Image (cartoon, rainbow, N blue to C red):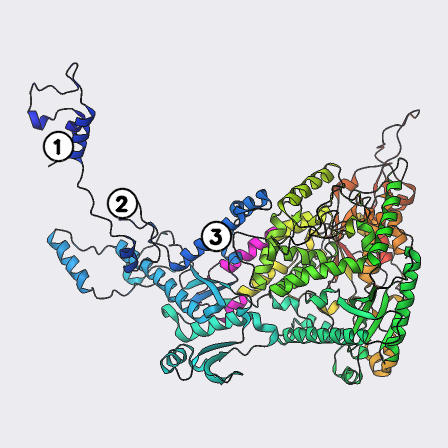
Amino acid sequence: THPPFGSLFGGSSESDHGPGSTHKSASDSKGSSCSAAELAAIVAAASLPPLPHSPGVAAYKRSGAAAVWLDPSGWCNLAAHMTKSSTAAVVAAARATLTMLESPRDPDEAFTAAFLTPSSPATAFDYLWAVSVKPCLSQPAPQPPPAKKQRQQQQQGAENGHQASTSSAEVLCKEVSIWREQEAAVETLVKKALGDRAGTVRAIRRSVPAGTPWSGSLSSGLPRAAGDGEVMVGAVVDPTLALRLVDIGPAADDTAAAAKFRAFWGEASELRRFQDGKISEAVVWGVGPGARHTIPDRIVAYAVGRHKPAGGSGAVRGAAGALDVVLRERARGPAGEAELSAGIEPGPEEDDAYVAASRLLDSALDKLSRELRGLEGLALKVVSTLPLSPAARHTSPFPPRPHPLAGGPELLASMGQQEGLARCLDPVDVMVQIENSGKWPAEPVPFAKLKSALGVQLAQALCKMGMRAAASEANGIDVLMDGFAFRLSIYSGRDEAMLAKQAAAVAGSSAAQAQPGAAPTAPGASNSATSWILSSPEALPLVKSWHHGLVAGVAGANPAYAPTVRLAHRWLAAHMLSNHFVPEVVELLVAAVFTQKSAAGTVPGSRVTGLLRFLQLLARHPWAQRPLVLDPETGAGGAATPLSSTPLGAAADAALAKPVALTSKVVRELQRRFDEAKAKGAVPAMWIATPRDVSAVSPWTATKPSRDALSHATALARTCVRAAASLLEAPSTSADAEDDASEAAQAALLAALFKPEATDMEVVVGLRREALPHAHCSLPAALAPRPPKRAGQPDALTAVLEGAKPPAPAKRSRAFLDAFPDKAVEGRGPEALRAELLLGFDPLQSHLLPQLQTLVTLNPHALEAGAAAAAGAAGASATAAAAAMQGPSMATVCADDFGGRLLGLKWSAAAFLPAAPKAHTAHLLLPCAATGLRGTPTPGSKIGPLLAVPNVAAVLAEIAAAGEGMVEDMVPVRSCHKLPC
């Protein structure tokens, strides 16, 4: 027996001494006290009996616990609620976090990635499936007969006076248990079906719905809750094994294992003889080459449909192929326009056509390399070739297709079978390396002339072999072969030395411009060779070759990389931002997703997950605080050159420097340079540092994107990734998860990612479809942006512009660039049509967008540079061109490079502040004479100069004139009225 409670503290109890007792407690006795030993003895006597010895971890394992984490007593398993898959996920996340924190190259970045970057199932798993199961809360669960041990416990409880409870709480607890049983059954089935394709398979636990007002009895069932009837399962796959076409089972002579294999796969299993002579059970997933990324979806759908786990209907919702429709081309010409108007979209066969075209391009590149290396009679022989275009890396959203007029007789015979014959061809850039020689000129200009002469000789040699080739000093050598157009540029061992001299000259001229009294330059258009590279036909191929090597290495190690880049291109174009991000920047951003260490611990294994992580990177990276460091060989320094101590951009050949090992010391130095450039206002909006771009700003981000465009892109990325993740993770709200629900979910996902809002722009410019070379690549009709409806009374601006109707555009301005007219194809021969082929011609990129950028730019130096560039002046400096991109603009021009029929203008509020007018911009300004607003008086003057603001009507009229033949109409979104063009 335990002593009374009061005696534990030296007090008395009335029950011990009786009423009126004169017993005096120890605490009441003067001078008396309880020693520590006596207190310990009292406490020991009052303690409960010690617990029996802990059964140990092995006992918990034998009882079926997936994970064991005992409390100090040894009798409570704190991880009793965890499953094997959740335990494995925790272990993997802990290992990934430990790897990031053990030897971080950038401690701040590692801490942010480990602890401040939230994750979600949509970005953590490569594939997500919603598997249909039997609803539990909508009907009472059947009660199984009690087992013998359970009956004994019930009888013992009855003898002790405890009656068996039949309250609704027990029923609800049983139903929650059924939820976990369903999740375990689905997870086990999916894991068995995927096999070694998936490293991790985990069912996402459903939350028990909160109680809602409800009247009724348990016999009638509970109302259906969100998530009841579906189990979400995620998988992290091996990127290579996930695309495997054949699952090989046990050998035919292993009858027991073969019987189990056939019992699981059913009709899908068959005996096959393989090349090594082995006969085994196998399952072949008959999909085309363009749909191999959907094989995991097909596997799960088949296994669930056959076995119907947890009493479900066998329906599965997946999203592996939900985004494929935005990467499909439609027919060219009137046929494609009719399909677009009718809402008919290309089918999955277009995905196979893309893969076939890519393989034909690879074959043509190999053939061209063999032919060039076999040429005889050249002054210097060809040593090797290297493709430079995104199409050769399979990262172009829409690579070139074989053209009948660019191939041999076989392709020419198929000309009549195509609907819409392309008028414009996108050439594939190829760098041709020739053997070294000690007789090259020592000066850059003679060196370039001699290279041009070698190009002419090379073109003549190709023509003698029956190919169609032409050489020009500006573009290199254009070759038509096997249905493709190739643009060759010659590279020799002396190129880097010559380019260093040219870069020094450019840096010297830039330094002269920086002297007092020189014309101002814009921030970022600095005194370095970076901007010169973008406009130099000699330097750009060399820099592209370095970029190609970096991207090709990442793409070769990650099968999901190239499709992710294609989707990223498409996302930017859908939101009319593709003109602000050059293709190389998109490839580098996606490469960072596939090479950076993250808390997920794995690289994306599917294109959908890759796109979501790309959007996360774009939205979450602090572009204004630090550069994005991209090292495709993280931790492998190699024989790299140490980082020089020269200031950023001061070295003339900084942009042509050798690679640098991106160690922690180099990253700290890079951050210091970034901070210095930021303090001077010379840092670009986006800085991506690779081993080649440490001593200078990357040429791909030196001028683009602008700060406004980057801010708009990050806001859109944040919104899209949040909406897409919620759609991928949300359970179905429909009573059935059949095909209709799956199609609706895919349509919602497409709209969340790729449907833009034209109302984000202040002015929407409509373009002629026939004047766009890539009109057949436009978004599906359901996703294409639509100009706002015109309604209400015209405002003053609209009335003025509609007062004078412009004359109809001339016939020369009504060119058909998407495809040859059908009458021309029927009435002219192949030679006449071949003479009208246009290689690398895109009026939107080469004419209209530069003109619009010039019109909306208020920087006087930028206006002069833009006008010179638009007129084709060869002397326009790259520094001035960079200033045109970085100078203060009246608006941001937004465009879709892949067939989008709308351009957008977003006005800049700062540009509309009154300022003193300039002579060469007076026709685009509106004086503030009516308000009497004037500037600060100059010394000796009583009144200040007259101020002016941009004249929107004049700017729009200039846009209409510059886009004659391309611009159909303009709609100011605020007034929603058509402006005639």
Instruction: Assign a secondary structure to mark 3.
Output: helix
Residues marked 3 and 1 touching at CB (< 8 Å): no
Q: Main secondary structure of the magenta part?
A: helix
- Residue 533: x, y in percent? 81, 54
Please give left or right for residue 954 compared with residue 389 in the image: right
Image quadrant holding the N terminus, namely top left
Image quadrant holding the C terminus, namely bottom right
Residue farthest top in this picture: 30
Instruction: Assign a secondary structure to mark 1.
Output: loop
Residue 980 visible, this angle: no
Q: How packed is label 1: few (under 14 Cα within 10 Å), some, or many (20 or more)?
A: some
Q: Name the kind of residue labelled 1 in the image.
A: Pro
- Residue drawn at (42%, 70%) of the image: 192
Residue matched to label 3: 95
First-in-chain label (2 vs 3): 2
What number is the disc on residue 3? Answer: 1
Residue 362 covered by magenta stretch: no
Please give left or right for residue 371 compared with residue 31 in the image: right
Q: Name the kind of residue labelled 2 in the image.
A: Ser
